Image: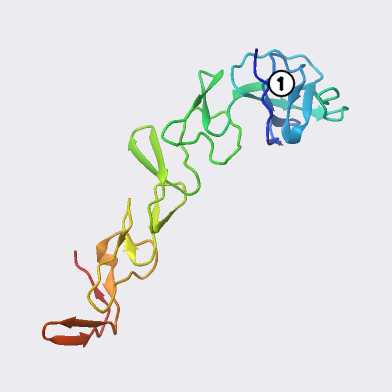
């Protein structure tokens, strides 16, 4: 028996001329069946259209809506329905055109949580994750390194005073004065510097830097 899947969000976007697109929970094999839609509502197409999916969701187009109050016993009636595709949730991708396969390496098939789609690969990371691509077609999503910020892409932005491209390392300092960077996002040690007017001490005494002093390696 196919599991009844309730769709958490309804997607209405322009489709073909005079039509709109919608994702529905897959609860049968004909658009004439009552199927769950967004916000707890239920939908049923006035016309009969057969489809075959093992996925949790389906994508349809329709030309209008007429009647019903959105309950399971009195669903909204859609007119001019056409089946478009089997569809999946944000962390699963469409495999073989009919079923959904879970993404690996914490990757996502859609960029936003609770998005439904027809994508056939996992190519996104969460908005606070760091993406790496160790091989062609392979996406790995990892927790953002300490002392840095990530946005779901391959870009790591280290905090001010740190540098790096995959981890964030504290800029080296000297006794008396820590080093820093001009801003967040430094990638290399050569972007670290001892600021002007910083003090230093050694076996012969101490002094003051008269200009910003950058590291060379």
103 lies left or right of 84: left
- Outermost right residue: 67
- Camera-nearest residue between 183 and 176: 176
Q: Quadrant of the C terminus?
A: bottom left
Which secondary structure lies at badge 1? strand
152 in relation to 106, above or below = below
Give the colour scheme shown: rainbow
Q: Quadrant of the N terminus?
A: top right
Residue appearing at x 46%, y 46% in the figure? 152
127 in relation to 215, above or below = above
Q: Position of residue 27 (x, y in %)?
A: 69, 19
Q: Quadrant of residue 106?
A: top left
Q: Position of residue 150 (x, y in %)?
A: 44, 52
Residue appearing at x 47%, y 30% in the figure? 103
Q: Quadrant of residue 194?
A: bottom left
Q: Quadrant of residue 213?
A: bottom left
> Number of labelled discs?
1
Q: Position of residue 115 (x, y in %)?
A: 60, 36
Q: Which residue is tagged 1? A: 82
For label 1, the crowd category at 10 Å Cα-Cα, with few meaning under 14, some 14 to 19 and many 20 or more, is many
Residue appearing at x 59%, y 17% in the figure? 54
- Camera-nearest residue between 133 and 208: 208
182 lies left or right of 205: right
212 in relation to 67, above or below = below
- Outermost left residue: 204
- Camera-nearest residue between 201 and 151: 201
Residue appearing at x 39%, y 63% in the figure? 159
188 in relation to 8, above or below = below
Q: Position of residue 145 (x, y in %)?
A: 38, 52
């Amino acid at each position: 028996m196919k599991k009844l899947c309730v769709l958490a969000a309804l997607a209405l976007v322009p489709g073909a001329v005079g039509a709109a697109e919608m994702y529905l929970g897959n609860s049968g094999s004909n658009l004439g069946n009552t199927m769950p839609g967004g916000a707890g509502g239920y939908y049923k197409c006035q016309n009969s259209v057969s489809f075959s999916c093992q996925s949790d969701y389906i994508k349809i187009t329709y030309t209008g809506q007429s009647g019903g109050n959105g309950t399971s016993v009195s669903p909204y009636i859609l007119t001019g329905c056409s089946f478009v595709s089997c569809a999946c949730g944000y962390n699963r991708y469409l495999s073989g055109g009919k079923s959904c396969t879970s993404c690996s390496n914490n990757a996502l098939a859609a960029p936003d949580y609770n998005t439904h789609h027809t994508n056939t690969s996992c190519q996104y990371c969460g908005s606070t994750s760091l993406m790496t691509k160790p091989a062609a077609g392979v996406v790995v999503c990892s927790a953002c390194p300490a002392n840095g910020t990530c946005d779901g892409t391959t870009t790591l932005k280290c905090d001010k005073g740190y540098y790096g491209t995959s981890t964030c390392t504290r800029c080296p300092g000297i006794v008396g004065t820590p080093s820093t960077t001009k801003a967040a996002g430094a990638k290399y040690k050569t972007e670290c510097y001892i600021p002007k007017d910083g003090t230093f001490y050694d076996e012969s005494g101490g002094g003051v830097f008269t200009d910003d002093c950058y590291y060379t390696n």
